[in-house]
Amino acid sequence: LPNDAQLYRAYSAFLLANDRSDEALRLARSEQARRPAAPLGYILEGDALAALGKLEEAESVLELALQRQPVAPLAVRLFAVKTARSDA
């Protein structure tokens, strides 16, 4: 079986792919409440906010995630949101 992080990521991706961004946002925030020091909830929130077109908010949340887990894939995700914001 996949671990918690894999399940949350997969379910969030499913919600976003099916235009259920609000539900993905609720899922992300529930993960943040469950594990506030972990980056996963913030990553999921950033993805949901970006899907909703709230790029400034997505950038802020992804910066929090990057502080919690400074890894390249997350830095790339944050850079993509910053680039999208500057193009908007």
Image (cartoon, helix red, strand yellow):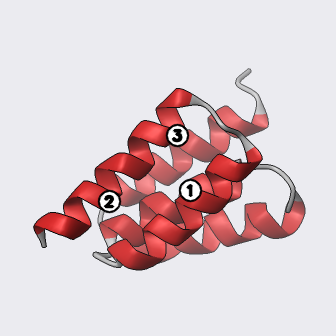
Q: Position of residue 37 (x, y in %)?
A: 87, 55
Residue in the foreground of this view, choosing between 29 and 81? 81
User: Marks 1 and 2, Cα distance to the nearest angstrom?
Assistant: 16 Å
Quadrant placement of the N terminus: top right
Looking at numbered disc 2 in the image, what kind of residue is underneath it?
Answer: Lys
- Earlier along the polypeptide chain: callout 1 or callout 2? 1
9 left or right of 2 in image: left
Tag 1 secondary structure: helix
Q: Nearer the viewer, residue 11 or 78?
A: 78
- Examine the image and state in which quarter residue 15 appears: bottom left
Please tell me how crowded label 1 is: few (under 14), some (14-19), or many (20+) other residues with Cα within 10 Å: many
Q: Residue at x 87, y 62 (%)?
A: 34
Q: Are marks 2 and 3 in contact (CB under 8 Å)?
A: no
Q: Is residue 11 left or right of residue 85?
A: right
Residue 82's disc is 2
The residue carrying mark 3 is: 74
Circles 1, 3 touching at the beta carbon (< 8 Å): no
**Is residue 20 shown to the viewer in this render?**
no
**Residue that numbered label 1 is attached to:** 44
Q: Secondary structure at mark 3?
A: helix
